Image (spheres, coloured by chain):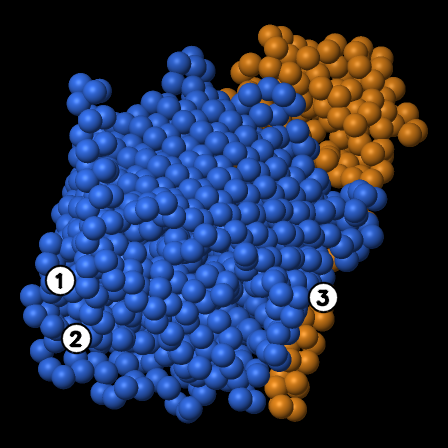
Amino acid sequence: MKKHLALALALLFLSCDHGLAPLPPIEPGFGGTIYFEKETWPPADSLVNLWVFASQIFPLDSEKVFQGLFSNPPAIYLYPAFDKNLPLFGDSVSYAFNLPPATYFYVGVLQRTANDINVRSLKVVGMYGTSDVPPIPIPVNVTDTGFLTGIDLRVNFRKPPPQPF
Amino acid sequence: MKKLITYCLGFALTSCLLHGQATFGTITGNLTDAENGQPVVGASVTLRGTFIGATTDAKGRFTLRRITPGTYTVAVSMLGYERLLLAGITLRAGESRTMEIPIRPVPLQADPVVITASRREQSLQEVPVSLATVTARAIADRNSVTLDDALRFVPGVSILSDQVNIRGSTGYSRGVGSRVLILLDGLPYITGDTGEINWETIPMFSVDRVEVVKGAGSALYGSSALGGVINVITKEIPSQSEFRFRLFSALYDKPRYSEWQWTTKPRFSSGIFAGYSGAAGPVSYLVNVARTVDESYRENDAYHRWSFFAKARYVLSSSQSLAVGVNYLDRSHGNFFWWKSLREPLRPADSQRDGLVNSKRGNISLAYQQFVTDKFFYTAKLIYFGNFWRDDSAGRVNNVSASHLVSTELQATYELSKPHILTFGIAANYDRVSASLFGQHPGFGAAVYAQDEISPAPGLKVTAGLRFDWQKVSVLSPTSQVNPKLGVVYMPDKETSIRASIGSGFRYPSIGELYIQSSVNVSQVAVLPNTDLRVEKSTSFEIGVSRKIAERMSIDVAVFNNDFRDLIEPSVEIKTYRPTPASPDEITGPVIQFENVTRARIQGLEAEIKTEWLRRILSTDIGYTYTWSRDLDANQVLKFRPRHLLYISGQCSWEHARLMADFRFLSRIERIDENLVRLAPIVNGDQRVAVKIVDLRTSYDLIQLGAPLRVGFTINNLLNYSYVELLGNLGPVRSYVLTLEGMF
């Protein structure tokens, strides 16, 4: 009888690790997958940079773009970073964009086509928006309690969405 | 024409009734425990070679009616008691005989009567495949509201949410295209649209027992029996008027971690089951109604369910019987598909917060049986199974589906000589689906099968069977299958049974898998049709031995090898596709599509030890299954299969009180579909652990109060262990359940 009691207690002990537990606190932000339409990639020399952008300002003009990028704190954020690129020439890439809690009214993919920094060298090639024609941006609300997923972006370099500037 | 039919029916009924009153005899009796004199409730009492039978009521009484004069053998069986055969009972015309039958309890009865392995009644010891049974008592003890709950404790069986997996046969497809065939009283009970098992339509309060055959069974049962067969056998109608009920109320505890709590309100689950059975002349009937409501421990996962089950049996004569069954379910259920994240595992993903599924499902069945001679009888069965469901989100209808499945079968059993039994039959089915997801498609099928059992030497039984199936779905080309099986049982002594079997299985792809088309579904991933799907097939081989190794200890060990070809699994990939056939533009994105993806081999070992201790006060049952499953194409372990299953049950009985405990262990699933987690997406969907669950139950029979009432209290998931059975689905938190059942 003692043996069986010991066995029962051993089984209870086995179960005492409690299983799954909450994950540690997370950095706010959003993420998802960027899908690139096949055979629409431009030549490499026109891909100086490729970023995901998130802007608290919309609509934009050329002045607001640079104010938003270079103010402190900024109102427009770039992913992975100003001096880094998304992986190029693939069919899809996942991303996780950590940024301060706020409502980002304009989210998309930005191509820098030349070394010059001016609005003529920046081109929005994908946008998180509605399926209307033309599409309308969908705001992304980042809170301090969570990381939003499923913010998928579609890029067709030959059919970019309407340009904001 | 109507008048003619009415006249014929009226004439037949009247003549039967008048004829019966003049010539039939009756046997009534009481069945008591030979050791303590208590009535034995729920035992089966039958007249061999006839369809006359009854189950004992709350006072152990039974009545066998409409017996043609002659000499009979009365057979009495009840799990935990010796099997009695009382031969030479002679009854004259109009005679009423009363019998007092004491029956001795026996330790470790390892050979209950089963019917699924060979489509005929036989002792479990004579069965050439591994077979487990779940009794009505076990279902009531565990308060299993749906059948999948009751199967979680069968060795070799694991449940992935609502999908059953026998010895690793099934991966993850949210139930679609079940590789285990479920039968309701011997007839297929798979839905016509998605080919899945709908657990909720099984009338649990009316279940007598469930038989689980492990390994391919298509040589007898046709499509879907790749990994095994589950046969749900409903109760025989008691011979006396009887009212039964069961009430339960459950309270969910808080989740283990306060940050997981999503509501401050207590969450309850409750239900009432009530049934009445009686007899009027040659017709006996049983009616059960159930109402269950579960607020659930998760957000948008509550359900409300009404169910109704009725069964009537008309004993035309001692050699003829006609049974009619009706079963209906109306359910409304939140559409929790997977969690928001492991930070909020009790909330659904945002896209599923408003989802609701309404379904109405039901069946009507007919069964006619006749003993032509005492060596030859046949059964004709017909079942209609209708499934209607609709899923909504935020009041908007997303998808609707209606499927109609009619199956019919004619089976004959002929005992050529004592050890030589031939079983053969024909079967046909018609399926019609009309669904926004699957389109409109018909399906037809037909089959013929035969099985021969011989005994070439003392203690040796050989069974060989063959089945031919033909199937045509919609406009696709027809396909046919031939499935053989061979089984051998050798019983060198009364305590030992050695078995070996080889058999094959197959499954036609369901209409759902072939034709599903959804540009956006609840998981936000497009699903595309694939009409090129081929039949998936399996071959099962096993050797096993069952032996009583001590007065109160028995062991059953089996090794098995299952090979699968052309397995159909949902694959998730990035594809360029047209959202609808009429769409002018193609888009690129994640797509779910059913494909013949792999060859697989699953080998393993299963052992079960049953023991009784301390003069039967304590009993234990330990079952362990090891499965080594491999994807032979990818040379990797198969996805979604646990390698180790360990189930331990203990029961302590003292006079009218019982204390029971269950421990369930499933090792951590080694491989999942990473693409599904990434592309669906299921946030933290890769988070999983081994399953280790302890349940504790106690019950007390209030016989001293003069009524056969039983009150029970259960704590499920005693240690509030947090686990997932299915990606992104946290298992139930601890709950406290109070039950009351009675029979008058």
Q: Amino acid at mark 3?
A: Leu
Q: Which residue is mark 3?
A: B719
Classed neighbour count for the residue bearing mark 2: other residues with Cα under 10 Å, few (<14), some (14–19), many (≥20): many
Which residue is found at the position 64% from the left and 74% from the top?
Answer: B657
Report in which chain the residue with disc 1 lies: B
Query: Tag 1 or tag 3, which sits nearer the N-term?
Result: 1
Using the image, determine if residue A12 lies above or below residue A72. below
The numbered mark at residue A30 is: none
Q: Amino acid at mark 1?
A: Asp
Q: Amino acid at mark 2?
A: Lys
Using the image, determine if residue B441 lies above or below residue B523. above
In the image, the chain rendered in orange is A
Q: Secondary structure at mark 2?
A: strand
Viewer-side residue, B591 vs B554: B554
Report in which chain the residue with disc 3 lies: B
Using the image, determine if residue B602 lies above or below residue B728. below
Which residue is found at the position 38% from the left and 32% from the top?
Answer: B386
Q: Which residue is mark 1?
A: B374
Co-location on one chain, circles 3 and 1: yes
Answer with left or right where residue B641 lies relative to residue A31: left
Report in which chain the residue with disc 2 lies: B
Colour of the chain lettered B: blue
Q: Which residue is mark 2?
A: B461
Tell me the distance, in whole angstroms, between the alpha carbons under discs 3 and 1: 56 Å
